[in-house]
Amino acid sequence: MIFSLCAVTKMYDHTPLFENISLQLEAGERIALIGRNGSGKSTLLRIIAREILPDSGELNCPAHLSVRALPQKPEFGEGMSVRQVLLAQLRELTSAREEYEHISEQLGSQAGNQDKALLARLSALGTFLDHHNAWDLDSKLQRILSEFRLDCFGSHPANLLSGGEQKRVALAGLLLYKPDLLLLDEPTNHLDVQMVTFLEELILREKYNLLFISHDRYFIDSIATATVEIDNQSLRRFDGGYARYLQQKEALLRAMSKEHENLLKILKNEEEWLQKGVQARRKRNEGRKQRVFELREQAKKNPSILRKMQLELMREQKHFNQTQSVNRQKMLFEARNLCLRLGERTLIENLNLRILQRDRIAVVGRNGSGKSSLLRILLGQLAPSSGALLRGELRIGYFDQHKTMLDDSKDLQQTFCPFGGDRVEVRGHNMHIFGYLKQFLFPKDDLHKKIGALSGGEKTRVALALLFTKEYDCLILDEPTNDLDIVTLNVFEEYLQHFQGALIFVSHDRYFVDKIAKSLLVLDGKGGAFQTVQSFSEFLETEREIFDVEEMIQKLPKTTAAVEPKNAATAPKKPTKLSYNETRLLAMLPDEIESLEARVRAIEAQLATNPPNIAELARDYENLQQDISAKLEQYVALEEKREMLEQK
């Protein structure tokens, strides 16, 4: 056992966060903590890290075990470089390795006269180094610096880096040390998808004992051996990752519904007995009367609990059908040979793109590839280096990571009802402000709380809720899922799925992108940009396969190059193969065409039933046929070019 909590209770402002909870983590387990913001997840991690004490109950964790947590705001020594910070965290491991080498030399020089105390110490050090995988720390350090893209900051003062970069430095140090118990609070924030993939692989390979909080549902599904939900001041444990959690939660809901039906039957019989009067008034039946009253209270509570669980499951499991708007083909943006250069770097080169009324585009790529800059160009906040962006007359709703649309001096009611009153318009419905904000998990007491007094996650919820009270033709969202818990994400996703305009967003949350986006705009950070209708997960898998092939080719033995003519250095070199982007596009197009053709077949089947929305389906059918023709032409042109280059 790594740790156990027994009957732990923690209060916050006289309100219990959790009461009499118990939890234990065994060696080799990786437990994901999920629950609403404010349910006590981070507090629970701080209790296990011994940063705060519970109000009652016990934490049992062997004293010799090392427990380390990822801080929300890392602090580093003044003037310490990134490499110095990481080496300082590894001092215990490097000292152990040096001592192991020193004892090995001593024992080697003693020949047959072996010291038993030294042998025991050598064995203990070997076990310690094995556990921390610390035999080759230099290459391990370089790999993590490279994957987290911190190698270029090696000599930079760590305390002068951005918040996201500092968080990556702190995370790198924890991963390198590999404590007996690792506590991570939202570790995937500030990591792009490639970094998250590396983190998943490292955690699985190194077999960390891990307790973590995350709203990244794919991350949870990939690494969690168990999922623990905090709800109504108690814990409920489910085996496996996020997909298994949903399955078991659904089974639990069915069981609870059945129990409620049985309770109603029992209550009906007891109510009939109580109405007989004489029998019920006897003193010896006081206990039975009390039980009737308790059954009544339980019967009142159950429906609301069941409705809440059912709603959360429906939001997560079901992709809602969306109504097509009449002006679906209205063009909102058109980029013509658009280029963006920052200093000597070319982020986007010759981008040609049209964004229509119902498009849902996720802009993806590594950190620093120009995603947020592209959004700023669409908003008119940043001018392209060359080329043109044509924009129709449209209303744009913008969410930025810093929530600049909020005024810290105003309270919630003033924010949503700036001209007075207590009602808002949401998707054509006039709603009371409390009824609306309750969907975004705000209690009534918060209506007069100042925006400046809210947490980061609460501010994100306010900003997103505010977007849906206004009429927009297009929503542009920059990392909207940061700081949101899974319950709020489900609410947010439901609103986005009903939104009738265009949606352009940046997110590293793979689950969110797969669920919301209809296409991806991929930026490689070197000027390349292309659009694909693959899901984000499919694209990442294709990208990984291409990387594996290229890595395999690089490992093949090199053949002797043919002798170049004397004037080869001065003669312009003609291309002998497709470019990297062309090769990647050629590999992806068959899957994209197949996906479009599958959608065409599905629509053909629907049209055969003469449905009421036949006009909308016919428009979709025509658009898909046009997309297939365009992609087939593109594929044939690339294939002909490839064959022509190979024949030269």
Image (cartoon, rainbow, N blue to C red):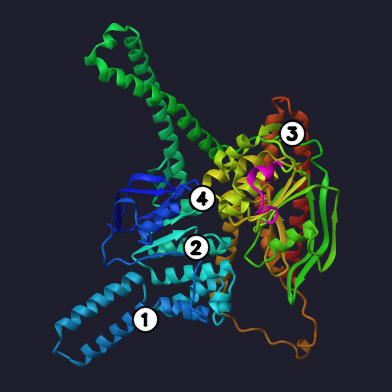
Magenta run includes residue 410:
yes
* Residue kind at label 2, given as amino acid type: Gln
Judging by the rendered image, the residue that carries numbered circle 2 is: 72
Tell me which label, 3 or 1, sits earlier in the chain.
Answer: 1
Q: Is residue 369 above or below residue 158?
A: above
Q: Is residue 71 above or below residue 37?
A: below
Expressed as whole percent of the image width and height from the top left, the position of residue 647 reads 73, 69
Quarter of the image with the N terminus is: bottom left
Quarter of the image with the C terminus is: bottom right
Looking at the image, which residue is at 43% across and 32% down? Answer: 253
Count of all numbered marks drawn on residues in the image? 4
Q: CA distance from mark 3 to mark 1?
A: 66 Å
Query: Start and end of the magenta stretch?
Result: 404-417
Q: Is residue 333 above or below residue 546?
A: above
Query: For numbered disc 1, what is the local secondary structure?
Result: helix
Instruction: Tell me the number on the disc at residue 489.
Output: none
Tell me which label, 2 or 3, sits earlier in the chain.
Answer: 2
Which one is in front, 592 or 301?
301
Looking at the image, which residue is at 58% across and 42% down? Answer: 440
Judging by the rendered image, the residue that carries numbered circle 1 is: 94
Judging by the rendered image, the residue that carries numbered circle 4 is: 217
Residue 274 appears anywhere in the view: yes
Instruction: Tell me the number on the disc at residue 617.
Output: 3
Q: CA distance from mark 2 to mark 4?
A: 20 Å
Expressed as whole percent of the image width and height from the top left, the position of residue 210 reads 39, 59
> Which one is closest to the eye, mark 3 or mark 1?
1
Tell me which label, 3 or 4, sits earlier in the chain.
Answer: 4
Tell me which label, 2 or 4, sits earlier in the chain.
Answer: 2
